[in-house]
Amino acid sequence: MSFNAPPFASYADLAGLRVTVMGLGLNGGGLASARFFALAGAEVTVTDRKTEAELAPSVAALAGLPGIRLVLGRHELDDFAKADCVIKNPGVKLEGNEFLEAARSIETDVSVFLRLSRAPILAVTGSKGKSSTVSALHHGLLALGYRAFLGGNITVSPLTFLDQTDDTTPVTLELSSWQLADLRGRALLKPRVAVLTPIMPDHQNWYGGMEPYVADKKLIYADQGPGSYTLCNRDDEWGQVFAKETRARARWYSARPLPPGTEGAWLEPDGRGMMNAVPGAEAREAAEILPRELAVPGAHMRQNLLNAAQALALFGARTDAIGPALASFRGIEHRLEFFHEWGGARFYNDSAATIPEAVAAAISSFDSPVLLLSGGTDKGLDFAPLAERAGRARRILLLAGTGTDKLIPLLRARGIEFGGPYPDLPSLVRAAKDAVRPGDAVVFSPGATSFGLFKNEFDRGNQFRDAVRDAFR
């Protein structure tokens, strides 16, 4: 679908526009868009197929804002055909959508932000590690004294801070494949530094194959120029493809030392992060940008912080200050988040692990015995990577779901015992209480989606923490 030019070129142009927000939701993007346009003086229609009862928290948050009309439990074609601009939720497909086909102009909260803000952009996409990488990058910017902002797929709409940005305020954006797809052909995303974290199968129920999924990921560098940087994974085939295609300067990252003459960053065997060809540095020898000791566990988290460190250096931060700034990063909610201790066991919420490879990485993040709580709804993924690493866990307890149904035969074929599957979180946590031992790391890492039992992976993580605190007092 081609995109017509939006009916605005500046914030002042928004007053009086008829704007339809498609998808209020509960994660903040639709709410932020509605609030932004209402406060700018637009006439806003918010429409969602979910009912007012299902959307109660978001509806309550809109109370008192001027010029907002709610159409809930349905969509009406006139709301799209007569709007000057439609703001689309990234989870809605363009193709074959009669409502979007009737729209004159379609934007997203990210595209509106990119049109109206002059902030320098650092953008991150990939299959695993996006949220941890952007959070570490934002943490580093703040620790180094920048006035900086973080938004995108991490559930913070950039429209919430647009009015606080200018050409001196770096903005870090986490971008999903869906958000990137909505930017195709617009020539809006031109990040100073683009990071592609490791690519693995994900959202295959949506895409039906890896090629279209990766094609959307490539949009992160589609409009970069030669004065910017693209960080690519030296350790997988997709990184090689990205490095050849980007018009920006390709830089590598790797879990092992890079070959001589290869520009990028890598991890030494002792865990330190090193970088060569530092912009503006007089010496050409490698500089340490990540120390041995970090506040977060796991080899994959160390790689995420390495990517954040290299991005900071390429953005212009002093290399000798980057390591200390990132060493204080303590991780984020729902990603190997330590939140409780009981009877000598430590509990970790890794609910944002929605692909099997993320669970495999979580199991390998601990030196202590792992009591793994996993499983959920399938989204067309291969559970073999999880099954191959599952034997490293001391004990496995499974939450019921279609993804769990695919995992169980793989575990049985490998002779790996498990408990369950349990029908809900409370019963899973009760089983964990019977199985836990002093010294265990109790890790809730589903490796599947949250459909059915939960609103989203964040709701799933919150419910898990609540269930643990109730059961393990």
Image (cartoon, rainbow, N blue to C red):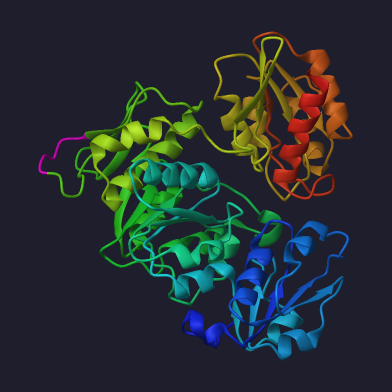
- Image quarter hosting the C terminus: top right
Q: Residue furthest front?
A: 64
Near-viewer residue (420 or 318): 318
Residue 351 in the image, given as x and y percentages of width and height: 68, 38
Q: Is residue 294 left or right of residue 353?
A: left
Task: Answer yes or no: is residue 258 visible.
Answer: no
Is residue 279 visible to the viewer in this orientation of the structure? yes
Asked if residue 284 is among those painted magenta in the image, a careful observer would answer yes
Determine the main secondary structure of the stretch shown in magenta. loop
| 147 magenta-colored | no
Q: As displayed, is residue 262 above or below residue 248?
A: above
The answer to whether residue 249 is left or right of residue 86 is left
Residue 369 screen position, x and y as percent: 63, 14
Q: Is residue 100 above or below residue 168?
A: below
Check the image and name the residue furthest to the left.
282
Measured as percent of width and height from the top left, residue 299 is found at 47, 28
Relative image position of residue 433 (x, y in whole percent): 81, 17
* Residue at 88% across, 27% down: 427
- Residue visible at 36% across and 35% down in the picture: 325
| Residue 84 occupies quadrant | bottom right
Rendered-image quadrant of the N terminus = bottom right
- Position above or below: 407 against 54: above
Range of residues picked out in magenta: 282-286
Q: Residue at x 61, y 81 (%)?
A: 41
Q: Residue furthest bottom?
A: 82
Q: Is residue 223 left or right of residue 340?
A: left
Q: Residue at x 34, y 21 (%)?
A: 270
